[in-house]
Image (spheres, coloured by chain):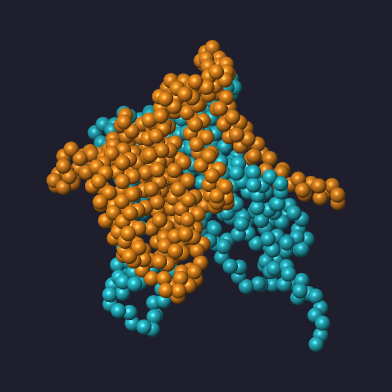
Amino acid sequence: MHLRQRILRLTPYLLLAPGILWLLVFYVYPSIQMFISSFWSGSLETGYTVSLANWTTYAGAIDRYGEQFLRSIVYGAAATVICFLIAYPLAYTIAFRGGRYKSLLLFLVIAPFFTSFLLRTQSWKIILGDDGILFGPLKDLGVLPEEFRVLATPVAVVAGIAYNFLPFMTLPIYVSLEKLDGRLVEAAKDLYAGPWRPTGTVVGGIVGALVAIGLAGAFEYVIPVWAVVGALVGAVIGTAFLSESFVRVVLPLSLPGVFAGSLLTFIPSVGDFVNAELLGNTQTRMIGNVIQSRFLENNDYPTAAALSFILMAGILIAVAVYARLLGTDELTSARG
Amino acid sequence: MSDVTDDGVAVRADSPRQRPLRDRLARAVDRYLLWGYAGLAILYLMLPVVVMALFSVNDPPGRSNLSWHGFSFDAWLDPFGVPGLFDVVRTSVLIAFLSTIVATGLGTLIALALVRYRFRGSSTTNLLIFLPMATPEIVLGASLLTLFVAIGQPPLFPTNFVTILIAHIMFNISFVVVTVRARLYGFDRHLEEAAMDLGANEWTTFWKVTFPMILPGILAAALLAFSLSIDDYVITSFTAGRTSTFPIFIWGSARVGVPVQVNVIGTAFFLIAVGFVAITSYLGSRAERPLPPPRPEPDERAATPVVERTRASVPQPEG
């Protein structure tokens, strides 16, 4: 009996061992190796030597590719904001109004994942083409000027990224809204929670203007014009569609889902290079494009490793801050 | 307009008080606006999929398939009519198949350990499961490549089929764990206790009770792993070397023009995956259905919570 109990205590570790070992060898160790490789000098033919003096690789990498790093963060943030603006009402509708169509709607949200990521991006190239199926007819009708274009601009890249990671934002928000106890909202209404006026008008206007300024900045559009548009749209939404029960009960309780979704959207967005390559131009290159070409075209492993390590370190810090604030449970359960 | 901004929780339709017209109008606008917005979002999500399917029946004069030229079913009749396409699809399917089997096995074991047992190090394990999903794919691929370069000898360098497989198993494990674990959380432990009470040992209980119950979750995880693997471009591009997979073929042909046949295969994969999801969710909904009222069969009796049965069998003091 004694032996049997000892085996029972070991059971979880025996179950874990093979999978965890795989992750240690092929996830944790490569990350360490990447850090070591960033201090390499030499070449594939002559072999590599590690020396701390090669910290200059980092200085050089930041100096040469700082612009692409900054652009990746800006595009990632813009895509995350767009995802939130699309995903929140979508998740809200599915969670509260979905009824018996709930699972069908959820399936439609994840359905794009069953198509090749590259083919979907290729489809956007077809849709957004200068004389493609969307803008071609509009230009023939004279609705759009002939020189109007979206493809090969920052808008196309950010829209493509937002498209690809939209389900990562929608599902966690949905999970947090679904868990919400409807009686809390009833209680808020019983306690005279009504329309959110006039605060909603002011707050909506300010938030709308800020979002519009940020997006216009990322897209290199004329900022003042879009700031006014954003303020107007925000004010209308704040006046007509936001109630006190939403702002004070539903929104705060869904914030963990919003944070999880933002992280799950922002992280892959920053590292993406497929959208920038297929939908962008040479002025929209992101850090992922640089890492890929350094690794696979130039075989410049030390620089590429240094760039990847900076990217990973930044993300680990973001995750650590998140985990400290909200715990890891929300993140892992949201993905399932 | 005081009720425009509904919380969304079911509103009593049979409200005894007749609402003013303005309120009802506002409510209708609110409802249709929300649905309209959600509909547009779904359209945005589905549009590229529809375009992909549409352009699989396109009839372009050359190789470039970027504008509409007319209907043709030719590519569907000859889906591998492009040199090299069959080989890359076969490689992709093989890698997806092998990586799914290994990752589903390893991931299910981890999920069982995490849900069934309290043990030292479980939160570290959770973190280790989460991190690969939170790392950008490019970093996963890049770090694996630096490992393979550092080792610098076969079978790991130059990178090849084996290294792609290693990478795919690695990134699939976390997704399997998360999917199976979600299924295990809702599991009724009483069923296992009941089986043990009826004399089944751990092994029999696992295969006769636990495994059939979590099978839909495992199938869902396997489907997810398969579709992630067959679709992966970013990590594969770092670990592929000279080996070509379907996504690598698409990437390579994107510059010179993606042939129609690629859309055909993409559409076929989509339809097959949707079919699988339909089947697994059907199985899942069957498994989740409440159990039928107890019938006098041994299997069914096992489903009654143990506590109740024991209490019933204990002689109750009279009066």
Which quadrant of the figure has residue B18?
A: bottom left
Q: Residue at x 33, y 33 (%)?
A: A284
Residue B162 image position (x, y, % from top left): 56, 29
Against B177, residue B5 (above or below) is below
Q: Residue at x 73, y 69 (%)?
A: B307
Image check: B60 left or right of A92?
A: left
Q: B151 or B247: which is nearer to us?
A: B151
Hue used for the chain lettered A: orange
Residue that lies at the very extreme toward the top in this rendered image? A46
Tell me which chain appears cyan. B
Q: Residue at x 45, y 74 (%)?
A: A191
Residue B25 image position (x, y, % from top left): 28, 72
Image check: B257 left or right of A62?
A: left
Q: How many marks?
A: 0
Q: B199 or A195: which is nearer to us?
A: A195
Which quadrant of the figure has residue A70?
A: top left
Q: Is residue A291 visible?
A: yes
Against B207, residue B145 (above or below) is above
Against A28, residue B287 (above or below) is below
Q: Is residue A301 visible?
A: no
Residue B182 image position (x, y, % from top left): 57, 54
Q: A42 or A322: which is nearer to us?
A: A322
Q: Residue at x 60, y 34 (%)?
A: A28
Image check: B42 left or right of B225?
A: left
